[in-house]
Image (cartoon, rainbow, N blue to C red):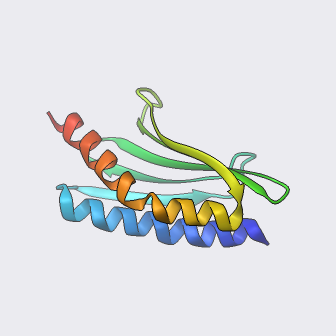
C-alpha cells in the first residue's frame, strides 16, 4: 500500500533530519513519531528545550498525496510553513529528498530565533 511506503520513508526522513539538526544546534532532547490513525496522518519531531515542532502532514487522495511541512510552537501557535506540494508517491518522495537541505537551515534558524 502506498501510504505504508510513504510512512516508512517519513520515519527515516524524520530520523535523518533529527540527526543533522542535533549536529548543528544544541538540543537537550527530541522525540519523534508518526500518527497513522487520524484522517490527516502526520509525522513530527519535537525539539527541547525550544518547544518547537516540525510537522509533516500527508493527505492521500487516490494516487495523489498532498504534503505540508510546517514549524510551530508546541502550543499550536506561531506556525511557519516550510513547503507544501502534491503529486504521486514517487514525485512526493523525490521532492522531499530534494528539499532536505532546504529544510535543515529553516529548522536551525527557527531554533536559534527561539533560543534568544
**Does 2 sit left or right of 96 as displayed?**
right
Task: State the residue at coordinates (31%, 68%).
Answer: 19
Task: State the residue at coordinates (43%, 48%).
Answer: 54
**Does 105 sit left or right of 38 as displayed?**
left
- 42 shown above or below 77: below
- Of residues 62 and 77, which is closer to you in this image? 62
Farthest top residue? Answer: 77
Task: State the residue at coordinates (22%, 55%).
Answer: 27
Q: Position of residue 41 (x, y in %)?
A: 67, 52
| Label tally | 0
- 90 shown above or below 42: below
Q: Where's the C terminus, which quadrant?
A: top left
Q: Position of residue 115 (x, y in %)?
A: 18, 38
Question: In which quadrant of the rendered view does residue 29 lie?
Answer: bottom left
Q: Is residue 31 visible?
A: yes
- Of residues 38 and 97, which is closer to you in this image? 97
Task: State the residue at coordinates (28%, 40%).
Answer: 110
- Of residues 94 and 70, which is closer to you in this image? 94
Q: Position of residue 67 (x, y in %)?
A: 62, 49
Amino acid at each position: 500500500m502506498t501510504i505504508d511506503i510513504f510512512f516508512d520513508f517519513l520515519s527515516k526522513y524524520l530520523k535523518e533530519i533529527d540527526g543533522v539538526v542535533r549536529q548543528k544546534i544544541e538540543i537537550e532532547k527530541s522525540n519523534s513519531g508518526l500518527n497513522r490513525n487520524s484522517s490527516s496522518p502526520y509525522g513530527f519531531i519535537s525539539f527541547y528545550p525550544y518547544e518547537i515542532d516540525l510537522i509533516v502532514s500527508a493527505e492521500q487522495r487516490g494516487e495523489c498525496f498532498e504534503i505540508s511541512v510546517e514549524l510551530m510552537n508546541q502550543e499550536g501557535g506561531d506556525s511557519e510553513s516550510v513547503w507544501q506540494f502534491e503529486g504521486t508517491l514517487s514525485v512526493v518522495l523525490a521532492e522531499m529528498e530534494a528539499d532536505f537541505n532546504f529544510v535543515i537551515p529553516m529548522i536551525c534558524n527557527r531554533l536559534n530565533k527561539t533560543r534568544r
